[in-house]
Amino acid sequence: FAALLASAGVAVGMALSGNLSNFAGGLIILLFKPYKVGDYIEAQGVGGTVKEVQMFHTVLGTVDNKVIYIPNGSLSSGVVTNFSNQTTRRVEYGSDYEKVKQVIESVLAKDSRILSEPAAPFIALTALADSSVNVVVRVWVNSSDYWGVYFDINKNIYATFNEVGIGFPF
């Protein structure tokens, strides 16, 4: 009976180890406050605005309206980048960006599946990498049009860039 009770205790302890880790992580986050509700953070390969810090999870809202639950155990023991903590940030830009933006805007304007609500198309320069200038394009579409728009816009931007002489690295 004692051996059965001991092995049941070990099994329950192992089953709860992840939850206990998340609970302890939640306490650490609430105590040391590396981020707060409203901060934009990146952790565990995802980024978003902190919507809620719960006891076991932190809830993030992404820019494309997804909700992500990250276990507090991994947040308290991993790398978290808080973009809202400082009062200033540096912005970098490339010289041909305006031409690229104009071309992308013209491609987007030709596709009637792209919606203007809840937000107009968003185009931004995201990084000046070692051998590329990275641009992000975000548009709203009906869910049924998602993959068609995704692939068609990529193809049309590629073709239009080649037509107007905007090169790609490599």
Image (cartoon, rainbow, N blue to C red):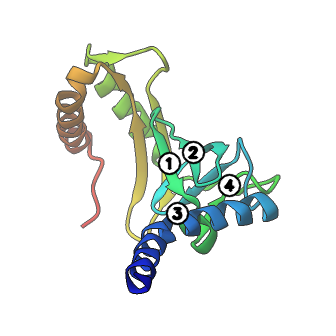
Identity of the residue drawn at 59% across and 55% down:
56
Disc 2 is placed on an element classified as: strand
**Closest to the observer, 30 or 83:** 30
Q: CA distance from mark 1 to mark 4?
A: 19 Å
Disc 4 is placed on an element classified as: loop
Residue 69's tag is: 1
Q: Earlier in the sequence, mark 3 or mark 1?
A: 3
The amino acid marked with disc number 2 is Val
Q: Which residue is mark 2?
A: 59
Q: Earlier in the sequence, mark 3 or mark 2?
A: 3
Can you tell which quarter of the image residue 7 is in? bottom left
Mark 3–mark 1 CB contact (< 8 Å): no
Identity of the residue drawn at 59% across and 60% down:
72
Disc 1 is placed on an element classified as: strand
Mark 2–mark 1 CB contact (< 8 Å): yes
Q: Position of residue 8 (x, y in %)?
A: 41, 74
**Closest to the observer, 152 or 92:** 152
Q: Earlier in the sequence, mark 2 or mark 4?
A: 2
